[in-house]
Image (cartoon, rainbow, N blue to C red):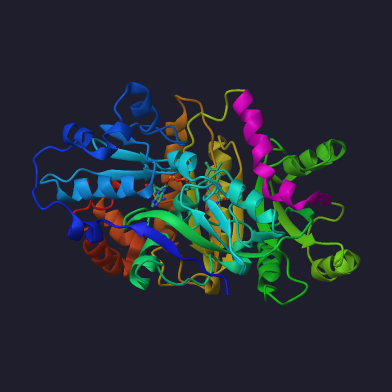
């Protein structure tokens, strides 16, 4: 089975071994007298880098930034916070690829997890003799991929973008086009104490319960190549029906099953090729654009099937069987044949291109939602065809694809809709520095529409402003979430940027 063991540093455990004499102010002066003092940075450059994120909308200054040289450094910091009479806040920061300050600690201490990479001496990723890798929390998925491929293995489930840390991703859940088939794994226990309560709490736990320093990731034999296909639809119900049909074929031994499925909108405002990947042959651009002009929105179904030397001969037939009866626009199926690494790392080239034009570090007023399948067509009418087309500002990818609920373990903190199949919709906006509020208004209008229409959406990578909103977000999971917080982080030290237990 796919499983993950995570090792966390939690504040409650540490309290039992900590200094029992409380002090009044520990940030930053007392901290500087501790062993970790030398790794605490108070200079403007360090503060600046820990006070912003990929979203480029929030700015919150920590008092100090810890560049840990070992997990013991983090233990010492958490211990100090816990034993301070005025406990200070701590946020682990992975790559800071959150969009609303989630990895910040206003007036507290940010832990730059990636600093640990410099001290791992090759121990950041260890591929075990079973089908697993033990991976340090600060490692990037691209490094996990490169290390496991050396053994001919790779994780089964991914994020679209590989330059995210393992700890930051597990704290949210981590989704992509493979999720319909694998979910996020059937999970085992926290390795240190075999504490399953903590384990489930931490997965999708938004950094509230501990700092993930290691995770065991299940591996599979890595394929060599990928057949990557996009099909275009003008009719939303055909598009979503075909998506749902394809993800229903998901048995792990079902030979025909696809390995990846997502979907996007193509609209007049957006370019055909965006940072998530350039795909369509230039010679076909005109005919695609003409469809977009006619229908205002074209829905693009995107799938992938992995193959190898020994599966190559049956690939074509399997795909033919799978695609039989699909209702995409005739003549609008496009194919690519790429290496496995090229496929998984597909977002990188777009990132580098935007970076070189200074367009990667602009505000990103993103909105990511999960919504029940039964209301996806209402969402299409009310949001895609009404709000989005009327406002006419959407830039960047808009993702739409379904997942199977039975691949998610309900004991995790992550929150999903209560239907067997649910969709993720991601508005991955980029905006000018003085324009992000217009996108935010659109996001608010979308959420309002859902509320008025009774569409029970849940935010992924959630941003909520007050306790009432968080209680609503967690729904029936709120009591467990709050009890676990009281148990594992009773002084509410960790991950204040999520604004769940502070600012309320
Ligand atoms: P950060 O943003 O640094 O931290 C996120 C949260 O986790 C914070 O609350 C932080 O305190 C906490 N945290 C960080 N490290 C740890 C740790 N070691 N232990 C405990 N808590 C920790 N997400 C997907 O699921 N699928 C995708 O395909 C995907 N694609 C993306 C593409 C891009 C270009 C970007 C910018 C983001 C994408 N994301 C995707 C979102 C991403 O997964 C989340 O933003 C994730 O949190 C980023 O990881 P990070 O390492 O930058 O975490």
Instruction: Report the magenta stretch's main SS.
Output: helix
Residue at 10% in and 46% down? 85
Which quadrant of the rendered structure holds the N terminus? bottom right
Front residue (pair 112, 412): 112
Front residue (pair 345, 454): 345
20 with respect to 158 (left or right): left
Instruction: Please state the horizontal and vertical placement of residue 396, each as a whole percent of the image.
Output: 60, 38
| Position above or below: 392 against 225 | above
72 with respect to 233 (left or right): left
Q: How many marks?
A: 0
Is 486 part of what is drawn in magenta?
A: no
Is 345 part of what is drawn in magenta?
A: yes
Front residue (pair 396, 338): 338
| Position above or below: 10 against 27 | below
In this orientation, does residue 351 appear? yes
Front residue (pair 452, 11): 11
Q: Which residues are magenta?
A: 333-356
Residue at 61% in and 69% down? 130
18 with respect to 97 (left or right): left
Instruction: Please state the horizontal and vertical placement of residue 318, each as a whole percent of the image.
Output: 84, 69
Indicate the quadrant where residue 46 lies: top left
């Amino acid at each position: 089975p796919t499983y993950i063991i995570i090792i966390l540093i939690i504040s409650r455990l540490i309290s039992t071994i900590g200094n029992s004499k409380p002090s009044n102010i520990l940030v930053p002066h007392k901290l500087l007298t501790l062993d970790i003092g030398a790794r605490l940075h108070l200079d403007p450059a360090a503060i600046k880098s820990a006070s912003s994120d990929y979203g480029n909308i929030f700015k919150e200054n920590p008092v100090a930034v810890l560049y840990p040289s070992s997990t013991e450094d983090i233990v010492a910091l958490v211990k100090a916070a816990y034993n301070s009479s005025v406990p200070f806040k701590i946020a682990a920061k992975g790559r800071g690829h959150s969009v609303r300050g989630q990895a910040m600690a206003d007036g507290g201490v940010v832990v730059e997890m990636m600093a640990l990479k410099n001290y791992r001496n090759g121990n950041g990723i260890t591929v075990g003799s079973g089908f697993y890798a033990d991976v340090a929390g600060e490692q990037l998925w691209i490094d996990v991929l490169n290390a496991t491929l050396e053994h001919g293995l790779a994780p089964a489930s991914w994020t679209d973008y590989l330059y995210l840390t393992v700890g930051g991703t597990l704290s949210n859940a981590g989704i992509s086009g493979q999720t319909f088939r694998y979910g996020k794994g059937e999970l085992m226990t926290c390795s240190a104490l075999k504490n399953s309560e903590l384990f489930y709490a931490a997965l999708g736990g938004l950094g509230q319960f501990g700092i993930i320093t290691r995770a065991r990731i299940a591996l599979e034999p890595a394929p060599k190549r990928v057949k990557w296909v996009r099909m275009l639809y003008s009719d939303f119900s055909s598009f979503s029906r075909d998506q749902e049909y394809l993800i229903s074929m998901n048995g792990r031994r079902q030979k025909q099953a696809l390995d990846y499925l997502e979907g996007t909108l193509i609209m007049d405002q957006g370019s055909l090729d965006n940072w998530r990947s350039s795909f369509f042959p230039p010679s076909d651009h005109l005919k695609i654009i003409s469809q977009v002009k006619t229908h205002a929105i074209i829905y693009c179904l995107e799938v992938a099937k992995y193959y190898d030397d020994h599966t190559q001969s049956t690939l074509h037939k399997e795909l033919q069987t799978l695609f039989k009866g699909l209702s995409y626009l005739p003549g609008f199926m496009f194919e690519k044949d790429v290496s496995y690494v090229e496929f998984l790392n597909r977002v990188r080239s777009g990132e580098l291109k935007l970076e070189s034009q200074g367009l990667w570090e602009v505000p990103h007023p993103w909105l990511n939602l999960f919504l029940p399948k039964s209301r996806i067509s209402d969402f299409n009418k009310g949001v895609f065809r009404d709000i989005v087309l009327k406002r006419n500002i959407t830039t960047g990818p808009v993702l739409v694809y379904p997942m199977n609920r039975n691949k998610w373990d309900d004991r995790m903190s992550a929150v999903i809709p209560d239907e067997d199949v649910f969709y993720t919709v991601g508005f991955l906006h980029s905006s000018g520095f003085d324009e992000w509020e217009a996108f935010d208004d659109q996001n608010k209008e979308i959420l309002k529409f859902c509320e008025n229409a009774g569409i029970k959406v849940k935010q992924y990578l959630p941003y909520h402003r007050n306790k009432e909103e968080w209680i609503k977000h967690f729904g029936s999971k709120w009591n467990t979430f709050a009890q676990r917080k009281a148990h594992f982080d009773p002084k509410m030290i960790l991950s204040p940027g999520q604004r769940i237990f502070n600012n309320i």
